[in-house]
Each structure stands twice: as C-alpha cells, then as structure tokens.
Amino acid sequence: MDLSKYYQRLVRDLDGWSSASQLAPGRIRVSVPQAGGGRRTVVIVMTPAEWESMFSVAHGSVDSAFDRVKQTLLSMKPHEGFAVYADYGLEPSTTETLPEPDLPEPGSGKWVAYGRHGDEARDNGDR
C-alpha cells in the first residue's frame, strides 16, 4: 500500500474542506473554521503510517476517518493548537506531543480476591 498517496489525499481533502498544507513530514497545518466565524490554525501531528492505521483499523474507510478528523478539529478548545495521533485517533493538545500517562509505580498495586457474595476474601491460611 502506498501510504504517501493516502496521506496526500488527507492533506488535499483537508484543503478542500478548509485550508491545509503539509508543513513537514508528519505535520499538517489546517485553518479550522470557528462557530462564531473566522478561523484558527491547528497543526495535526500524524505520520502517513499512523493515518493508515487510523482509517484502516479504527474506522474502516478513509471517508469515515476523515469525518472523525474534522469532528476532532472542530471540537478543540481555543488553547489547543495541536491534534496529536494516539491510539488510532487524534487527541487535542497544547503541545505537539502528548503527556506521558500518569501510571502507578510497578508493584505498588494489590491483588484482591472477592468471595461469591462480593466481599473481600480473607486469607485464613487454608491453601
């Protein structure tokens, strides 16, 4: 599959919907229409391979994925200037990278077994 062909189609379709251009590899600048009139600039941070994953895995078609891209761009808050690829979609962001998830330290959790009545089972030494 020629990924660049699909990526160029994305840029072309965004340009037809609004105004868009490829800034650099993996960066598309889009002038997004605003509800009250006017436009604002948003940068999409997504590689051709990520776009292929988005339209083929998550949405099943280029058109469906393109509609989702437009929805994401239109729903972004004023302080969010980037739409960053993550998990088969675009996430609004204030920077071109998403923050690392705040995960608990490895080994800091506790496994708990529940009895059949939903109460916490107790270790009574019977093994």
Image (cartoon, rainbow, N blue to C red):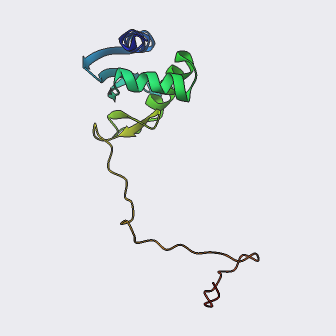
Viewed as shown, does residue 23 lie left or right of 100?
left
Q: Residue at coordinates 43% horizontally, 29% vertically from top-left?
A: 73
Q: Residue at coordinates 66% horizontally, 75% vertically from top-left?
A: 114
Q: In this view, does 67 lie above or below 80?
A: above
Viewed as shown, does residue 9 lie left or right of 60?
left
Q: Residue at coordinates 53% horizontally, 72% vertically from top-left?
A: 111
Closer to us: 104 or 34: 104
Q: Quadrant of residue 90?
A: top left
Outermost residue toward the bottom in this view: 124
Q: Position of residue 116 (x, y in %)?
A: 75, 75
Closer to us: 35 or 59: 59
Q: Is residue 34 above or below residue 105?
A: above
Q: Quadrant of residue 102?
A: bottom left
Q: Where is residue 29 in the image (x, y as percent from the top left)?
A: 30, 21
Closer to us: 44 or 118: 118
Q: Residue at coordinates 47% horizontally, 31% vertically from top-left?
A: 72
Q: Position of residue 112 (x, y in %)?
A: 58, 75
Q: Which quadrant of the rendered structure holds the N terminus? A: top left
